[in-house]
């Protein structure tokens, strides 16, 4: 009996010790596993932070590189600033010029007039409109634009100077004028004939000035007058009956053809005697009147009315019959001054009229 109990007690003690060892090992494994997983978690966090730092760090040098680039290239901050966009007027002006150069003058005018509506006093826009009309050979319209620029005065800059030259000399054309006075008159250096202002060498008379005045008239399409100053050489002895002045007005017909006007033309001396004894220069006024109900003169009547005026005589208005001959617009004038049937001076606006209708050096007496 005792032996049995002692064996049982020994077995219980061995079992307890074995169980205790198993529990201790289990706890140790649990702690080991816990430490292992905790270590892996910390390592994973550290690795993630390192990766994140690697991804974020390159952005900082990129910013610094971008800022340092202008310094390395020697560029200023102003140069790196964005270029301001052109204004609407400048954009329309550029488009109009490009369209005209491509031959689309109609669309070019539309763009330029749109620019002019936004800025009516823009000299560059008015200049390009005038040039476009010249490209279309609508010279009466271009002259209107040149006159606007001329009225603006020197404030228009180079456009004013160009307008002044255009109105005095006309559109530059190839040297196609015939021999004689036409080519000589268009050359500012030509010494033997006057093209406005002063008396040319070898001449007895000269045209000192031509002033154009347009009068508003509700009953007329156009009512204007030329005041022409005619001066003689101070010491010259003249016979005033041998002075002959011819004034020709011209119109464009349907904006294509250039013809002698069919408007009413009248001459009147504004100085009393017009013999150059008491007054020098003498002033002749020549009027151009186109009523709204147009009267078209015959070729014979036009020649009589526009051909000549002699001192002491008044011009007669053109007479003729009513007819339809297209839409007419005033273009300009041509003035010829003769003394003793020899050409003394010429003046025209636009000057190309002298190329289209070259004057004769002499005229046959009536």
Image (cartoon, rainbow, N blue to C red):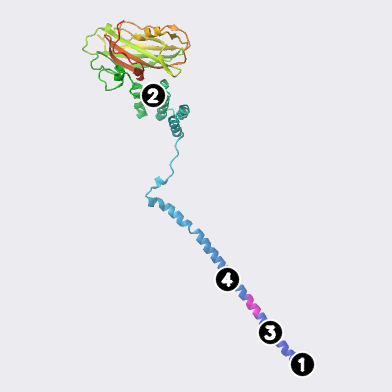
Q: Residue at x 35, y 20 (%)?
A: 352
Q: In front: 172, or 226?
A: 172
Q: Secondary structure at mark 3?
A: helix
Quarter-of-image position of residue 190: top left
Tags 3 and 4 touching, CB below 8 Å: no
Q: Which residue is mark 2?
A: 146
Q: In this picture, is 366 found above or below 29?
A: above
Q: Secondary structure at mark 4?
A: helix
Q: Which is closer to the viewer, label 2 or label 1? A: 2
Q: Which residue is mark 4?
A: 39
Q: In front: 342, or 60?
A: 342
Q: Residues within 10 Å of mark 3 (few under 14, many from 20)?
A: few
Q: Which residue is mark 3?
A: 18
Highlighted range, magenta: 25-30
Measured in 3D between alpha carbons, the distance from the residue under mark 2 to the one under mark 1, in whole angstroms, is 142 Å
Tags 1 and 3 touching, CB below 8 Å: no
Sequence-wise, which precedes: disc 2 or disc 4?
Answer: 4
Sequence-wise, which precedes: disc 2 or disc 3?
Answer: 3
Q: Is residue 8 magenta?
A: no
Measured in 3D between alpha carbons, the distance from the residue under mark 2 to the one under mark 4, in whole angstroms, is 92 Å
Q: Residues within 10 Å of mark 4 (few under 14, many from 20)?
A: few
Tell me where residue 141 appears, x and y as whole percent. Answer: 42, 22
Tags 1 and 4 touching, CB below 8 Å: no
Measured in 3D between alpha carbons, the distance from the residue under mark 2 to the one under mark 3, in whole angstroms, is 122 Å
Query: Residue extending furthest bottom?
Result: 2
- Quadrant containing the C terminus is top left
Q: Which residue is mark 1?
A: 4
């Amino acid at each position: 009996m005792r032996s049995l109990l002692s064996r049982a007690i020994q077995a219980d003690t061995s079992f307890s010790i074995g169980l205790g060892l198993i529990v201790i090992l289990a706890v140790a494994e649990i702690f080991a596993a816990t430490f292992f997983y905790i270590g892996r978690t910390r390592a994973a966090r550290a690795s993630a932070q390192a990766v994140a730092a690697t991804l974020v760090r390159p952005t900082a040098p990129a910013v610094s590189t971008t800022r340092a680039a202008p310094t390395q290239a020697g560029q200023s901050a102003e140069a790196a600033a964005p270029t301001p966009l052109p204004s609407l007027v400048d954009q329309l002006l550029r488009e109009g010029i490009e369209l005209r150069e491509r031959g689309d003058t109609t669309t070019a005018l539309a763009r330029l007039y749109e620019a002019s509506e936004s800025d009516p006093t823009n000299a560059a826009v008015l200049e390009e409109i005038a040039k476009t009309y010249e490209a279309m050979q609508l010279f009466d319209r271009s002259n209107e634009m040149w006159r606007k620029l001329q009225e603006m005065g020197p404030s228009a800059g180079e456009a004013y100077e160009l307008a002044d030259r255009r109105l005095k000399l006309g559109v530059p054309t190839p040297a196609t004028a015939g021999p004689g006075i036409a080519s000589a008159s268009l050359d500012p250096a030509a010494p033997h004939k006057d093209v406005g202002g002063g008396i040319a060498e070898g001449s007895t008379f000269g045209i000192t000035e031509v002033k154009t005045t347009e009068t508003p008239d509700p009953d007329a399409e156009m009512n204007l007058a030329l005041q022409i100053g005619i001066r003689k050489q101070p010491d010259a002895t003249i016979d005033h009956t041998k002075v002959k002045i011819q004034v020709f007005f011209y119109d464009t017909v349907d904006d294509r053809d250039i013809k002698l006007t069919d408007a009413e033309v009248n001459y009147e001396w504004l100085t009393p005697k017009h013999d150059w004894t008491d007054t020098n220069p003498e002033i002749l006024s020549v009027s151009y009147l186109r009523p709204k109900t147009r009267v078209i003169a015959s070729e014979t009547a036009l020649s009589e009315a526009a051909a000549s005026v002699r001192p002491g005589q008044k011009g007669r208005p053109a007479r003729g019959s009513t007819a339809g001959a297209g839409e007419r617009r005033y273009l300009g004038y041509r003035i010829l001054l003769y003394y003793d049937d020899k050409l003394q001076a010429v003046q025209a606006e636009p000057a190309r009229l002298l190329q289209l209708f070259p004057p004769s050096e002499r005229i046959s007496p009536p």
